[in-house]
Amino acid sequence: MAVILTHNSYGKSRVRLSKITRRPDRHEFKECTVDIRLEGDFEASYTRGDNSRIVATDTMKNAVYALARTQTLADLESFGLTLSDHFMANYAHVAKVVVELADLPWQRLVIGGREHPHAFIGGGSERRICLVTRTRQEKRIESGLDGLRLLKTTDSAFKGFLRDAYTTLPETDDRIFATMLSAQWRYGVNQANWGDCHRRIRQAMIDVFANHHSLSVQQTLHAMGTAALDSGPEIRQITLTMPNQHRLLVNLTPFGLDNPNEIFVATDEPFGLISAALTRE
Amino acid sequence: MAVILTHNSYGKSRVRLSKITRRPDRHEFKECTVDIRLEGDFEASYTRGDNSRIVATDTMKNAVYALARTQTLADLESFGLTLSDHFMANYAHVAKVVVELADLPWQRLVIGGREHPHAFIGGGSERRICLVTRTRQEKRIESGLDGLRLLKTTDSAFKGFLRDAYTTLPETDDRIFATMLSAQWRYGVNQANWGDCHRRIRQAMIDVFANHHSLSVQQTLHAMGTAALDSGPEIRQITLTMPNQHRLLVNLTPFGLDNPNEIFVATDEPFGLISAALTRE
Amino acid sequence: MAVILTHNSYGKSRVRLSKITRRPDRHEFKECTVDIRLEGDFEASYTRGDNSRIVATDTMKNAVYALARTQTLADLESFGLTLSDHFMANYAHVAKVVVELADLPWQRLVIGGREHPHAFIGGGSERRICLVTRTRQEKRIESGLDGLRLLKTTDSAFKGFLRDAYTTLPETDDRIFATMLSAQWRYGVNQANWGDCHRRIRQAMIDVFANHHSLSVQQTLHAMGTAALDSGPEIRQITLTMPNQHRLLVNLTPFGLDNPNEIFVATDEPFGLISAALTRE
Amino acid sequence: MAVILTHNSYGKSRVRLSKITRRPDRHEFKECTVDIRLEGDFEASYTRGDNSRIVATDTMKNAVYALARTQTLADLESFGLTLSDHFMANYAHVAKVVVELADLPWQRLVIGGREHPHAFIGGGSERRICLVTRTRQEKRIESGLDGLRLLKTTDSAFKGFLRDAYTTLPETDDRIFATMLSAQWRYGVNQANWGDCHRRIRQAMIDVFANHHSLSVQQTLHAMGTAALDSGPEIRQITLTMPNQHRLLVNLTPFGLDNPNEIFVATDEPFGLISAALTRE
C-alpha cells in the first residue's frame, strides 16, 4: 500500500518567557507563552528518519530566549514578527512558520496611592493573544483575546425561536447573559500601534456587550463584531466565539417562596456555543 | 461601513449522556459527551435578532436524550449518524450539522474472577472520539482517540539534526520517548463494525510505537500512521498528533554519582509537538 | 473484629449560588459557591443503613437557595452565619456544622467613564473565602483569600542558607519573588463590618509584600502576617501559605549573550511551599 | 503588639521523579511525585531573616534525585522511609519531616500476547499515595489511593431519610451509585510487603462496593472501610472519602417517552461528600 504524507508540521509549545526591563525609576515586567510551529521540507525525517533538516524544538526554544534578550517585548505582535523573521531568514527549507503568543497579565501595584516601581498583582483569566503566520509569500498578523468574562443581569431576551416536539425551553424577556469572550481579528497592516489597536477593539466589544439590548447571543455577538471592525481601519476581519454560560432560575415554589429573577444556579455544562466571522466589505 | 457575516455556527456543547441497558443477566453502561453544531440559514438571528429559524440549543440537548432512549448507544459512530440524520431531516434550513462525541470509559469490574453484572471501574485518560459531519451533499465519518499515554524507556534516538548558533541539545542514542497520542481518521465507508475498526487501528498504532526503533518522533509517528492505514480498507486518511513529553536526565555529578540513563525528571512544558496527516494513494 | 467509627461527616459541596439584587438605579450581583458539612448523631446510617436522621444533601442545597432569597448576601460571613444558624436550630441531633463559602468575583463595568447599572466583568484568580464552624458551644468565624498572585522583580534575596553535600543552589542578592497567596484568619468577634476588615487585612499584606526588603520567603510571609494582625483588633490569628513560584535565570552564554537578571523562565513544578501561623499574644 | 509564631513548616512540592531499572531482559519503570515538608528550629528565618538553619528547598529536591539513584523505588513506602531517614539523620534541628508520594501509574504493554520489555501505557486517574511522618519520637506510615472511579448501575437505594420543609428529593429504590474513592490508612507496622498490603486493602474495598446492597453512601462507605480493616492485621485505621457523583434521571415525558431508569445526565456539581474514619478496637 502506498501512503502519502499530505501534511506535516512540528514545533515547540509552551515556551514560557519572563522579561524584566530595568529602567532607572521602575521595572517593566512581561510574561508570555510562545508556541512555534514550522512547515517545510521535512519529509525525510518522517519517512526515513533523516534528521539533517530538522531544527530541534529545543533550538527553537533557545532562539526565543536569545531574541528576547536583544529585542523588545513591548507588544506580542512585534515579538511575534521578530521570531517569524528569524525562522524564515535562517532556514531556507522552511516554507511556513506560525508563532502563537499569549501574555500572562500582571498589573502594577498601587501602594498608598502611588504606582509601585517593581511590585505587581496577577490579572484575571483574560489573556491577550497574537498569531503571526509567515510564508514566503505572505505575512499575516492576527491578534485577539481569550477568557474575557462578561455578564449582564438584564437587557437580554430570547424569544420567538423555533418550537417543535423537542422544545421545552420557555421564552424569556429577561435573563442573565454570561459569557467568556474569545475573539481573534486579522490586521490589514503590517505595522501599527498594536497596543492601541488592541485596547480600542477590546473596548468597542465590551461597550456593546454592556449597552446592547440583546434579543439573542447571536445578535449581540454580531453587534460586538461590527463595533470591533468599526473601531479603526487597521482591522480587516474578526471571529468571535461566545459560550452561553447559563444561569438557571431556581424554583423556590416548594419552599413557599417566589423568585422574581433573583436567585439562580450557574451551570458549566451543557453550554450553548455561538460563533461568527465578520469581514469588511 | 458595510460588514459581511462570512461564517456562523452555533450549537450545544458538553451534553452529558449516561445510558443503562438492562439485560436479564447484566447491565451495559455507556457514558459519553455530545457536542452539536449547526450551520445554515441563521443570518437573520445575527443581523436582526429574528430568532424564528433558531433551533434553541436547549432543544438540541433534549433531542440527544430523547434519541438516546430509543436508539442504541453501542457505537459513538452509529449514534452520531442518528443525531446528524435527525437535524438534517427535521430542519430544512440547516445546511450542515457537526456532531462530536467522546466516550467516558468504564470497564466492567472482575470480582472473584468473574465479570460483575453491574459494577464498573473508571478507565484512564484515553477517550474514544467520533466526529460526524453532514451536509446536504456529503456524510463524513471520522473517529479517533485522545489522551492515550504511551512511553518507552529505550529504542529511541535523536541525532544528526541541524546544528547552528542556537543549538545546545546533545545528540542521543537512547532517550525516553513519552507521548500522549491523539489520532483522528476518516472512514471511506458509511457502514462498518465501528468497534472492530477502532480496536484494529488503535492496536496497530500501539504495536508500532512499542516495536519501532525510533530515530525521531516524526519517524515513529509516520510509521504508526502507516500501520493504521494498513490495518484495514475502511480507513482512508489519518492525522496523528504527538507531544514529545520530555524526561530530562538529572545531573547527579555534584553528588558524586553517575547517572547511566536511570534518573529523570518529567517536565510538562515546554514540549515538542509533532503532527502529520497521511492518506492512501 | 470490632470496628469503631471514630469520625464521620457528610454534606453538600459546590452549591453554586447567583443573586441579583434589583435596586431602582442599579443591580447588585453576587456569585459564590457554598459547601456544607454536618457532624452529629448519624452513626446508624453508617452502621445499619438507618437514614431516619439523615438530612439529605439535596435538602441542604435547597436550604441554601431558599435562605438566599430572604437573606442578604452582602457578606460571605453574614450568609455563612445564617446558614449555620439554620442547621443548628432545625436539627437537634447535629453537633457541628461547617459552612465554607467562596465568592466568584465580578466587578462593575465602567463604560464611557460611568459605572454601568447592570454589566460586569469577571475578576481574576483571587477569591474571598469564609469558613463558619458552629458547635453547640462555639461559633468560629474565619475569613481569607485564595489565589492572590503577587510578584516583585527585585528586593528579594536568599543567602546564608545551610550548605551541605546536596546543596547546589547559588546564593542570590536579587531574584524574582512570585507567589500565589493563600491566607486564612480567625476573627475574635462575632459581628463586624466584614467587608471593611477583609479589605484592611488584604491591603496590609499586599503593602508589606511590595515594600519588604525580603531576605527569604519565610521572613516576608512573617512580616505580612504581622501586618495583618496589626491592621485591626478584630483578627486574632492568621495562617499564610505562599508557594515560591520560581523564575529561573536563563543561561544565554552559549549564544554569546549576557543575562543581567533580565530573561527568566517560569516553572510550575517543583515549587517551594512556605507556611506559618501567627497569633496575638 | 506582640505576635507569636505558633506554627511553621516549609518544603518542596511536586518533585517529579522517573526511574528506569535496567534488567537484562526488561526495564522496570516508575514515576512518582514527591512532596517534602520540614518543621523544626526555623524561627530565626521567619522573624529575623537568618537563614543559617534553612535547608534550601532546592537541596531537598537534589536529595530526592540522589537518593533515588542508590535506593530502590519498588514501593513508595520504602522510598518515603528512606527520605524521612535522610532528613532526620542529617539535620539535628529538624523536629518533624513529612514525605508525601504519589505514583503516576504506567502498565507494561502486552504486544502480540507477550509483555513488552520496555514499552508502557499510562494508567487511569487512580494514584497510589503514601505519607510518611517522622518525628524524633515516632514513625507513622500511611498509604492510600486517590481518584479511583467506581460506579454501579443498581443495588443502591436511598430512602427513609428525614423530610422537612426543604426536602424535595424523592425516595428511590434504584439509583446509579458513582464515586471517586479516596482512602488513606495507617499501618501499625514499620515493615511489611507494602505492595501486597495495598493490593489486598484496595481489592477488599472494591469487592464490597460491587457486591454491597447499598442503603446509603454512608453505609457502603462504612462496609468498605470495615472490609479494609478486615483484610489484614497490618492496617490499624482508615479514612474514606466518597463524593456522590450524581446521575440524574432525565425527564422524557415531554417527548412522549418513558424513562425506566435508562437515561441519565451526569453532573459534577453540586455533589454530596461523605467521609468517615474507622479504627480497630
Image: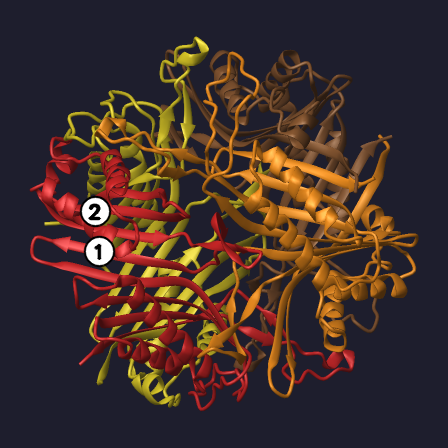
Chain colours: A red, B yellow, C orange, D brown
Position of residue A51 relative to residue A41, above or below, is: above
Query: Left or right of A279: which side holds B55?
Result: right
* Residue ID at (16%, 35%): A54
* Residue ID at (54%, 16%): C163
Residue B183, percent from left and from top: 30, 48
Kindly check if marks 2 and 1 are in contact, taking CB atoms under 8 A apart as contact.
yes
Kind of residue sitting beneath label 2: Leu
**Can you tell which mark lies on residue A118?**
none
Kind of residue sitting beneath label 1: Val
Q: Nearer the viewer, residue B61 or B248?
A: B248
Position of residue A208 relative to residue D235, above or below, is: below
User: In which quadrant of the rendered view does residue A112 lie?
Assistant: bottom right
Query: Left or right of B11: which side holds C161?
Result: right
Q: Residues within 10 Å of mark 1 (few under 14, many from 20)?
A: many
Residue to which mark 2 is pinned: A83
Number of marks drawn: 2
Whichever of labels 2 and 1 marks the residue nearer the N terminus, that label is: 2
* Residue ID at (52%, 13%): D71
* Residue ID at (22%, 27%): B158
Q: Nearer the viewer, residue A94 or C265?
A: C265
Residue B175, percent from left and from top: 31, 24
| Same chain check for tags 2 and 1 | yes
Q: Residues within 10 Å of mark 2 (few under 14, many from 20)?
A: many
Residue to which mark 1 is pinned: A132
